[in-house]
Amino acid sequence: MSTRHIRIATRKSALALWQAEHVKARLEQAHPGLKVSLVPMVSRGDQLLDSPLAKIGGKGLFVKELETALLNDEADIAVHSMKDVPMEFPEGLGLYCICEREDPRDAFVSNNYANLDELPHGSVVGTSSLRRQAQLLNLRPDLEIRFLRGNVNTRLAKLDAGDYDAIILAAAGLMRLGFHDRIRYSLSDTECLPAGGQGAVGIECRTNDTELHQLLQPLHEQNSADRILAERALNRHLNGGCQVPIACYAVLEGDQLWLRGLVGQPDGTVILRAEARAPRADAEALGISVAKDLLAQGAGEILAKIYAESN
Ligand SMILES: NCc1[nH]cc(CCC(=O)O)c1CC(=O)O
């Protein structure tokens, strides 16, 4: 029995609100009597929703306001899609819980075509992720990748308006919002390797709030946490975020992690791949070693060019 009041800072997008409500419900279930409320706020990323994210630069566009609220004691936890969480945390904040990962894959959404192979020559595919773009163009150089931003609902509306033949979205986001039926199929990991952390929700809070860390324990899932630790180590070593053409995906085989990573040239002409296995206790070292392999193949040059263009 806890009498504490937990305030959850959240963005106001449908997906962010769903995730915050989900964490609220799970906390209340785990700790009867606990009071949990939402503190909705607008992030810089939300204000800039229509501009190319890669061009406005900076990481963590969607998390800075939430972190400020935590540091100012206006909220106690921030719920994030792990894919969007920056590598470094401000002094006094940290990640204290990773919930069980859901579907990590990218979903193919189209009103007219069942899959990538069915798309006619020259079809228009919507995504603003350089990671998805590089991999799709590598498989289908004839496709035209067209910029698509906005919340999940907005993106679906743009597809329905006829602006695209197909769009690619994270399966997890679609499922959370009840759009299962919009998924024609989920891209395999060989067609499109996911982004680090995709499909998992994580919880950030103040480092010194040990009582809260305890309350979060029942929501933590170690298998997901270890997989994502390896993925984030890879991203960190490549200085990557959600706005760069880096994919990485770890799975557990018993107590061994298998991590695959990829860096692609946005036009799809070059895809560098690396993979390795290691005991789960060595998740971070595994991420770094796969990142080093990619760098040795020339990933640094590809990424440097993208960073230079976005500044
Ligand atoms: N970049 C925005 C974003 N951040 C997390 C998700 C989906 C949910 C998740 O990965 O947990 C999405 C939408 C998308 O990429 O389609």
Image (cartoon, rainbow, N blue to C red):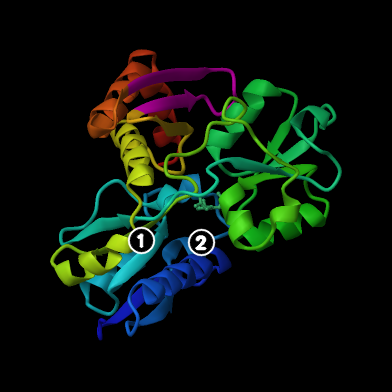
* Location of mark 2 (residue): 48
Position above or below: 5 against 151? below
Towards the viewer: 178 or 111 = 178
Mark 2 and ligand 1: say if the CB distance to the nearest ligand atom is below 8 Å.
Answer: no
Looking at the picture, how far across and down is residue 16, in whole percent? 49, 65
Say left or right for 200 vs 226. Answer: right
Q: Residue furthest left?
A: 208
Which mark is first along the chain, 1 or 2?
Answer: 2
Towards the viewer: 199 or 241 = 199
| Residue 42, visible in the rendered structure | no
| Residue 55, visible in the rendered structure | yes
* Location of mark 1 (residue): 219
Q: Amino acid at mark 1?
A: Leu
Is residue 188 magenta-colored? no
For residue 19, the mark is none
Q: Which residues are magenta?
A: 257-277
Looking at the picture, how far across and down is residue 222, in whole percent? 32, 47
